[in-house]
Image (cartoon, rainbow, N blue to C red):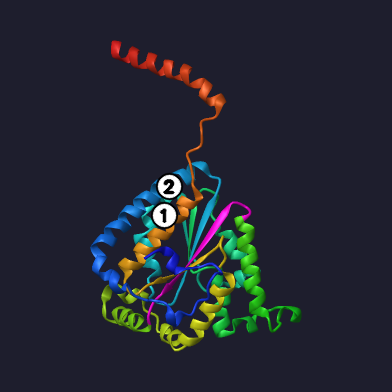
Amino acid sequence: MSIKDFRFDGEKKLNLKNEPTGAGDMKLRKKELVAKTAQNIAEAAQLQEMLYAERREGLVIAIQARDAAGKDSLIKHVFCGLNPAALKITSFKTPTKTELAHDYLWRINAALPERGVIGVFNRSHYEDVIAVRVHHYEKTYNFPDRCMTEDFFLRRYMQLTGWEDYLYENGYRVVKLFLNVSKETQSKRFIDRMVRDDKHWKLSTNDMKERALWEEYDKAFEDAINFTGTPQSPWYVVPADNKWYTRYIVSEILLQTLKDMDPHFPELDSAEAAKIPAIMEQLEQERAAKEMK
């Protein structure tokens, strides 16, 4: 298994019916892969420290999924193993009136991390070509007629690709994850939310209405991924039925992305370096004076 198996960057077309949702034979290696996940996160944290010190490049991880696919759990178990000082997590909910009064990338731009920081989007700019498309929310927008053309979503795919290219050319990488959960596993997780006290807070009866639109969401996800996956801003379609396996794959993606970014601790400025001998001498004198007392 390689993360390339899950990567969609324009070289191949996605058909979700052909993609795995579970761990399959990898279940036999669960103990090994759980341990490897922890190692990956630890190694990623070291690279994150260099990324934060260098501050030359930023990273955005956008997570899209159906309800109950495990977005929150993934963030908790993988990304929260990083340094929180160099991590920015943003959850995008239904747009507010203020957000809808602006272009759809307005709220996304406001959430971009500084260079040197890893930004994690729980849902993202892709809601505007997924949920909006499935429910035809674009028909409710207060747009001029020239904006409401038959190629509305095709133009949005172009806009999203162009925006991600713009970020890449300005020191950011965008990696997009789709957590691919099966209908059967989603059903089990919905039942958990109904019967378990510690899961009630996640329960929304509206989730069942979304579940009824499964095929429509399939098509929306496939088109979004096929139209916007590029070598510099790829998609990864990650099996989501077994959370430990999802975490392992995402930890591999995170680690490989950081390795590709190749951050380093910045060298000490020559002017600052020239001051070090005098400062070292001063500190040594202070230590010696303290010992004499």
What stretch of residues is rendered in magenta?
169-182
Residue at coordinates 44% horizontally, 55% vertically from top-left?
A: 256
What is the C-alpha distance between the residues marked 1 and 2? Answer: 8 Å
Q: Secondary structure at mark 2?
A: helix
Residue at coordinates 39% horizontally, 74% vertically from top-left?
A: 69
Amino acid at dot 2: Leu
Residue 124, given in percent of the width and then of the height, sits at 52, 68
Q: Can residue 293 be seen from the camera position used here?
A: no
Which residue appears farthest toward the top when viewing the image?
292
Is 181 drawn above or below residue 234 in the view shown?
A: below
Is 107 drawn above or below residue 210 in the view shown?
A: above
Residue 19, given in percent of the width and then of the height, sits at 42, 77
Q: Secondary structure at mark 1?
A: helix
Please state which of residues 191 and 267 is positioned toward the viewer in this rendering.
267
Residue that badge 1 annotates = 255
Q: Can residue 34 be seen from the camera position used here?
A: yes
Residue at coordinates 50% horizontally, 76% vertically from top-left?
A: 14
Tell me the quarter of the picture where residue 67 sits. Answer: bottom left
Residue 24, given in percent of the width and then of the height, sits at 30, 74
Q: Quadrant of the C terminus?
A: top left
Q: Is residue 178 magenta?
A: yes
Left or right placement of residue 257 versus residue 291 in this view: right
Dot 1, how many residues are within 10 Å of its Cα: few (below 14), some (14-19), or many (20+)?
many
**Is mark 1 in CB contact (under 8 Å) with mark 2?**
yes
Which residue appears farthest toward the bottom when viewing the image?
212
Amino acid at dot 1: Leu
Lower sequence index among marks 1 and 2 = 2
Please state which of residues 95 and 254 is positioned toward the viewer in this rendering.
254
Please state which of residues 293 and 173 is positioned toward the viewer in this rendering.
173
Residue that badge 2 annotates = 47
Left or right placement of residue 194 versus residue 174 in this view: left
